[in-house]
Image (cartoon, rainbow, N blue to C red):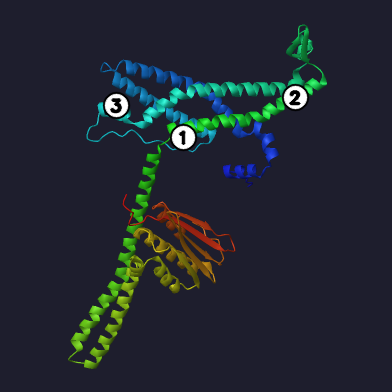
Amino acid sequence: MTYTAVPSAAGRGAAAARRGPSARLLLAPVSGRAWREYGYVATGMVVTPFAFAFAVAMLSAGAGLLVTFLGVPVLAAGLAGCRALGRLERARARALLGMRVDEPEPVRVAQRKPGAVALMGAVLRSGVSWRSMLYALLHLPWAVFSFSLTVSFLATGWTAFLYPAWHWVFPTFTDQPGLQMWEARPGENWYLETPTDLVMACTAGLLVVLATPWLVRGLTTVDRLAVHGLLGPSRLTTRVRELESDRGVVVDTAAADLRRIERDLHDGAQARLVSLAMELGLAKEKLLEDPEAAAKMVGDAHGEVKLALQELRDLARGIHPAILTDRGLGPALTTLSRRCTVPVTLTVDLGAARPAPAIEGITYFTVSELLQNIGKHAGAEHAVVDVWCTADRLLLQVTDDGRGGAQASPGSGLAGLAERLDAVDGLLVVDSPAGGPTTVTAELPWRDPDPAPR
């Protein structure tokens, strides 16, 4: 069986990037992107006039009927129709312009007041509805201008470029020697008829043909901005969605930490304390019968108590180390680097100020997990940890000389770290080529816990 490899969109994009500027310039008129942009401009003259006529008619009728009870439902219906046309425009922009535009927030009807009246009120209060109508009203003049300019350049460019192939039409079917350009003076006309004229016309047409895709790309850039600004979600809505996603990450992380603590207590300290209670019970029974055996059992129980206390200390350190709360990031990271199985060079430059406790905790556990990864998987001989602040951001960088190849793939520890940092508007960047070295850079907000009063 024979398989044929079909290049993906990313592969086609990489292949296009490898072409030189000259190749991109010459191939631009026949590229798929150019023809999709031509299609967007052309289909705009079908959709946009209808959207404009609909918006003007419904807005005029609704405003004129506001003195009666019919104005509100007519206006709401017009806004709802503009929202539907907005969905069509977003789909057209995705298909022909390759835009990544999210759907805006839907119409939210209060649960306690369902019904047609509540729905009309929600449509009228929605900013998306009014922005969709504004797009329908403003886009028509630009669509007409873009279409006229595009058609003019396409027709002029290709007509002039192919003129040597069809100039014979004039002497054959008319009494003119060629295409008349203008009349220099009465009775003296300039015709494109000589070989030099043909070369000049072809060259000028080629220049216009090569320039047309870039002109249309500039025109459609305005369309991209309009679709994104008027038909996409607002910045507030985008931010709310990000916060909702981050809240979900925080909740999931907290639940996972609670399950880990419960598992560690159940399998570790709790099991050891149950065993300790049983041994002390047996020692109590043998205290009078066999004091020496009872003393030995008490001694063993004493050792178990020490181990249980150590496990509880380790568990408490894993939740939130006391040294971090009492003395800050510098001493806490110093203690952490000493426990690493790989030699670590630590530099902390934060000054006397301290970030918010939550940021301190996330920074500590980020360095902790990165050092654990280095000790377990990197095969490194040395690691470097740098922590510093700049403006209102806290930055940390962990570098090792190991084998490299680390990736923040879904489900990995690095992906979990990236999600935890993203939940507080942070950022994680992994640079780990095969063979090393590996550099992981994290950026977090500072968020001073004691802001100065205003």
| Relative side of 149 to 72, left or right | right
Amino acid identity at mark 3: Met
Q: Is residue 36 visible?
A: no
Name the mark on residue 120: 3
Residue 79 in percent (x, y) is at: 36, 25
Return the residue at label 2: 202
Mark 1 residue element = helix
Circle 3 or circle 1, nearest the eye: 1
Amino acid identity at mark 2: Cys
On screen, residue 165 above or below 250: above
Q: How far separated are the C-alphas under marks 3 and 1?
A: 25 Å
Q: How far separated are the C-alphas under marks 1 and 2?
A: 39 Å
Q: How far separated are the C-alphas under marks 3 and 2?
A: 60 Å
Q: Is residue 296 visible?
A: yes
Q: Label 3 crowding class (10 Å Cα cut-off): few <14, some 14-19, many 20+?
A: many
Q: Label 1 crowding class (10 Å Cα cut-off): few <14, some 14-19, many 20+?
A: some
* Residue at 51% in and 24% down: 142
Return the residue at label 1: 228
* Residue at 31% in and 52% down: 453
